[in-house]
């Protein structure tokens, strides 16, 4: 038996450089429930059987308290963009030209393949290239600032060779890895628990000390929260109310991890609204907005 072996989650973050100058103020829309759309376009191998799709819907429902201040992003004549992300079933870079990103929607492209090493899953952010007016570029850049991270979309790849437990009950079968826990964890990375390229996460972290300092999460946790060396997870073994937190680097066989109160605090720190917290209707931005070119693999 190898039930003491803890496999690692992987997070993949690839960035593209966008630099835009502006002196402006932007009004973002009032908060609305985060609408998670699981996109099976790239599930070429038929990995997502009904039981797995049901679990992804449960994962989404657990975040029903989370709202997002965003307006629709729609290309038009003279203003274009292209999403770039990893095809979750091949691992190859792919793209979607000029998508519409409805207000409040987060689209997650899911797939499966045999992942290298001990990875259970990988996640990636959709990044973009864009051309157009300064106000168009500003509206895109405003989704990733030190005050708020409001993702458009992401990719999530699961290991096709893992023995998955796909039940709803938290009584995970011994000898299997819990699909719910892993999907929720990877969604956490897409939502912003990820150091590379996420300005709001970086702004809340004391990276030299490897501590997360965001006010809402630390108030719930009772102090700063230790980060692991990759700065995209809590330190291994970080617990709350006697249980491993969801965003620790590893999960053992036969275990269900779930969101904890401090992790919902992180959502608030990153600019999401979490019921019943009051919602800020406007976010004012000015000066230079930028997102940096970054590539990082295995950020755990
Ligand atoms: Zn992870």
Image (cartoon, helix red, strand yellow):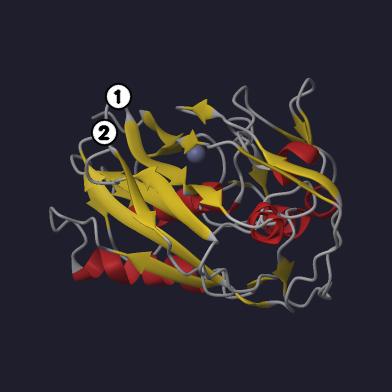
Disc 1 residue crowd, few under 14, some 14–19, many 20+, Cα 10 Å: few
Identity of the residue drawn at 68% across and 59% down: 264
Mark 1 touches mark 2? (CB < 8 Å) = yes
**Residue 115 disc label:** 2
Q: Label 2 neighbourhood size at 10 Å, few (<14), some (14-19), many (20+)?
A: many
Using the rendered view, name the quadrant where residue 237 is placed: top right
Q: Where is residue 213 shown, x and y percent of the image?
A: 82, 40
Residue at position x 29%, y 46% in the image: 88
> Circle 1 sits in a helix, a strand or a loop, which is it?
loop
Measured as percent of width and height from the top left, residue 19 is found at 67, 40
Q: Nearer the viewer, residue 247 or 85?
A: 85
* Residue 195 pos. (x, y %): 63, 35
Looking at this view, is 119 or 107 the one in front? 107
Task: Determine the secondary structure under disc 2.
Answer: loop
| Residue identifier under label 1 | 117
Question: Gap between marks 1 and 2, in whole Å?
Answer: 7 Å
State the residue in front, 50 or 21. Answer: 21
Please tell me which residue lies in front, 226 or 121: 121
């Amino acid at each position: 038996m190898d039930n003491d072996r803890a496999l690692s989650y992987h997070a993949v973050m690839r960035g593209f450089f966008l630099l835009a100058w502006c002196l402006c103020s932007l009004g973002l829309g009032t908060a609305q429930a985060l609408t998670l759309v699981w996109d099976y376009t790239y599930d070429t191998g038929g990995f997502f059987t009904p039981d797995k799709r049901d679990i992804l819907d449960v994962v989404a429902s657990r975040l029903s308290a989370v709202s997002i201040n965003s307006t629709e992003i729609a290309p038009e004549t003279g203003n274009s963009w292209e999403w770039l992300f990893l095809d979750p079933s091949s691992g190859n870079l792919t793209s979607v030209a000029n998508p519409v990103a409805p207000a409040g929607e987060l689209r997650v492209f899911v797939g499966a393949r045999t992942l290298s090493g001990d990875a259970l899953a990988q996640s990636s952010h959709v990044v973009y290239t864009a051309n157009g007016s300064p106000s168009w570029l500003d509206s895109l850049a405003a989704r990733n600032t030190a005050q708020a991270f409001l993702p458009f979309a992401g990719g999530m790849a699961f290991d096709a060779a893992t023995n998955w437990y796909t039940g709803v009950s938290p009584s995970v079968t011994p000898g299997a890895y819990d699909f719910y826990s892993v999907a929720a964890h990877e969604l956490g990375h897409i939502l912003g628990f990820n150091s590379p390229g996420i300005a709001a996460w970086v702004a809340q972290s004391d990276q030299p000390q490897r501590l997360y300092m965001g006010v809402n999460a630390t108030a719930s946790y009772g102090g700063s929260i230790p980060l692991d060396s990759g700065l995209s997870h809590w330190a291994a073994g970080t617990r709350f109310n006697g249980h491993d937190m969801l965003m620790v680097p590893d999960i053992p066989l036969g275990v269900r991890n779930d969101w904890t109160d401090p992790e919902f605090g992180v959502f608030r720190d990153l600019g999401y609204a979490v019921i019943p917290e009051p919602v800020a209707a406007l976010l004012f931005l000015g000066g230079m907005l930028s997102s940096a070119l970054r590539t990082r693999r295995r950020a755990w």
